Structures are given as C-alpha cells and as structure tokens.
Amino acid sequence: MTFLFTVSPDFAPDRLSGWYIFNTWLQKQTGTAIHLEMYNHYQQLHQAIEADKIDLIYANPYDAAMLVRNKGFLPLAKAQGQADEAIIAVNADSSVRDVADLQANSRVAFTDDPDVRLMGMIMLEPADLDAGNIVPVLADTHVLVAKHLLKGEADAGIILAEAYDNLSGVIRKQLRVLVRSQISVIHHALMVGPRLQAKRGEWRQVLLDMAADEKGRGVLAALGFDGWQTIDDEEMEFMIDLMDTLNT
C-alpha cells in the first residue's frame, strides 16, 4: 500500500526540492511506500482532505485544528525552534508609518493561507479594519503579495514572516514592515492520519533521531530545519484552542 504525503501550500518555493528529498529519505528509513503530492492552492488541498486521500501532512495551524477534530489526525512532530508569525508590510515609499494610519477601504493583499490571514487581520484591528471594510487583493503566493506592494496595487500586505525573511534583499529594501506578530506558540505540524497511526511511535523516533545522522542532517538542511521535536496531544489541543480564540 502506498500512503499519500503532502505539505501545506505556504512552504517557501526554494524548499520544494527539500520536501521531495525528505520523502525519499523517509521511505528508506521506514520501509514504507509514500507518494508526495503537492497542491498549489488550499482549495485543492482541502478537497483532498475531504476525500480522505491524505495520510501524512505538514500542516499549518489552521488546518491542523480541522484535521484533529474532523479527520482523526494526530500530531507527530514539529520543526525545532520554528513558529508561524505574520507581518504587515507596505511599500517603502508609502506615507503609512503605522498600522493605525491605514484607512477604511485600504487595499490589503494576502494569500489564501488561513492562519497567516487570521494573524494579519488581528494586527490590522488598531486601524479599525476588518474583512468588511478592506478591499482584498488575493495573491497565489507570499512573493506575489510583495509584488502587489511594489507595483502599487495594494496599500498593505499580510505575509508569512518566514516567507518575508526569505525574500531577496533587493525586494525587502523596497518594503517596510509595520508590525510583526509575536505569538510564538503557533506552528506547523507533521501529522499522521488514521491509516498511519499504528506507525506513529516508530516514525516519531525516526524523526527525532534525524539530526544525529549525517544524511539526516543534510535532508534537514534542505528543508531549512535544525531538527524535529515531539508534539504531544496536549500541546496540540492548546494550539487548537488558541486558534479558536484568535478566530472569534
């Protein structure tokens, strides 16, 4: 039997090859046939989840909550020292110096990444902005959010902090960060679905041992990770509850 693995579409484009390398490594370490399927948009991913096609996923916090509650997924591990944060950015030439300077009907660019958009909208509250009084500018990727700002097609943009930090220096010099979230306890998680849960303990140990192996460290470097660490069920429940609180 071949199991299906996927990754939340918000991964950095330069990490795409890293996920294929990781999938090959994981197959060898576990002796399990795993097919990596990448989805370009959240709509495609959510259709696959609803159809119960996914067995293993590196999920964003928003989807992780849905997977635990609705699809019986369990957390396996998270990347060491990494948290999901968002930034609000403007064009460096913008007269906007503070979030509170943004006006109703401002054009705000963002992707369909649900947890990043949620954090961004919370950070826009000091300007009395919400989904009802902004002009949304939808973009396929966080890089394209930045491009909307550079072209003057948006007044502000919500970008995953990691994606912003990975932009070229040339692009970052043309942008200005107004605010960066500091929630620190929201993160992506590698999760197993019902068909793989019998292997949960074994696979978790394989991941935890990865940084101790030379080849494993090379695969981690391709992902931009230092290593994996355990997420227990209680930690996952805390993050889900926090996402619920932020979403109200």
Image (spheres, helix red, strand yellow):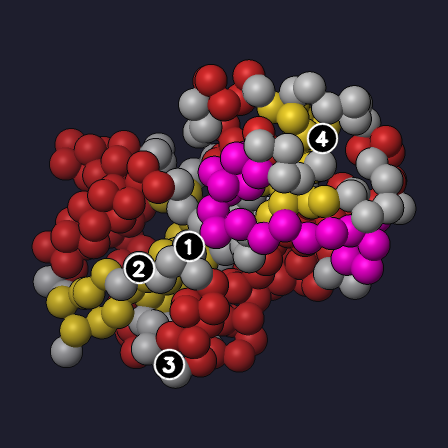
Which circle's residue, 3 or 4, is located before the other in the chain?
3
Which circle's residue, 2 or 4, is located before the other in the chain?
2
Q: Which residue position holds label 1?
A: 9
Is there CB contact under 8 Å for labels 3 and 1? no
Can residue 145 be found in the magenta stretch?
A: yes
Which circle's residue, 3 or 1, is located before the other in the chain?
1
Q: Which residue position holds label 2?
A: 38
Q: Quadrant of the N terminus?
A: bottom left
Can residue 216 be found in the magenta stretch?
A: no
Type of residue at label 3?
Asp
Tell me where residue 115 sits by quadrant. bottom right
**223 or 125, which is in the foreground?**
125
Type of residue at label 2?
Met
Give the vertical position of 24 relative to 201 (above or below).
above
Is there CB contact under 8 Å for labels 1 and 2? yes
Image spot of residue 136 (x, y percent): 68, 53
Q: Which residue position holds label 4?
A: 179
In the rendered structure, which segment of residues is drawn in magenta?
Answer: 129-148
Dot 1 alpha-carbon crowd within 10 angstroms: few under 14, some 14 to 19, many 20 or more: many
Q: Secondary structure at mark 1?
A: loop
**Relative side of 28 to 157, left or right:** left
